[in-house]
Image (cartoon, helix red, strand yellow):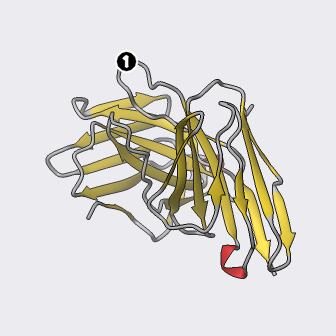
Amino acid sequence: SQKIEQNSEALNIQEGKTATLTCNYTNYSPAYLQWYRQDPGRGPVFLLLIRENEKEKRKERLKVTFDTTLKQSLFHITASQPADSATYLCAPGDTGRRALTFGSGTRLQVQP
Amino acid sequence: EADIYQTPRYLVIGTGKKITLECSQTMGHDKMYWYQQDPGMELHLIHYSYGVNSTEKGDLSSESTVSRIRTEHFPLTLESARPSHTSQYLCASTGQGGSFGANVLTFGAGSRLTVL
């Protein structure tokens, strides 16, 4: 069955460092992969989308990589800030009618 | 900032009561979804709709029902609430996805339901 794995343990880093979050998937052949941010008690907010033919995508301090051979996406936040503290969810998807399935997310805590 | 609205944000109700969670979006999106999420856990798709008069069950079995009579409105109903229904319910929508067809979701703030 299809499976999305994100590190369930919280990631604690110091302000100013780069945070790297991992998303692994199995039994998927996604056409793209999305990353969302979720704050406690709120709905997820879309951050970035990377297509299967793209190796890397950047948006301000965010960078996403997508390795379809390893079936893995990495999500980087450079120069992290305490305001970046949240849970980050990955969601591989296809262009069909299928609804989006999310990983369980990784909680990031940036210490000042 | 959000163009998708959920009410109520919080609801505490007794067992056996009927409840309806409202979800409305002003973006003209055809596709709408309901996800269920327990604290610290992953989102589970329970219902989705690809247009008016179209509804389907998601990956997680749910005793709730949905309707889609208008494009902008996608309410979720529980006929008889039970403590096992206690959870956060998140509504989301997406448009046509452009030429690429990717489903980028816009989520509401969620409805947190507690059944005593």
Q: Is residue A98 left or right of residue A10?
A: left
- Point out residue A5 in the picture as x, y percentages from the top left corner: 35, 63
Helix, strand or loop for disc 1: loop
Residue B36 image-quadrant placement: bottom right
Q: Residue furthest left?
A: A69
Residue pictured at 38% horizontal, 27% vertical: B101
- Point out residue B78 in the picture as x, y percentages from the top left corner: 72, 65
Q: Quadrant of the N terminus of chain A?
A: bottom left
> Is any part of residue A112 visible from this angle?
no
User: Which amino acid type is shown beneath numbered disc 1?
Assistant: Ser
Q: Where B109 sits versus A11, above or below?
A: above
- Point out residue B53 in the picture as x, y percentages from the top left corner: 58, 38
Q: Where B70 sits versus A72, above or below?
A: above
Residue pictured at 54% horizontal, 42% vertical: B49
- Point out residue B103 in the picture as x, y percentages from the top left corner: 45, 34
Q: Where B67 sits versus A50, above or below?
A: below
> Is any part of residue B83 visible from this angle?
yes
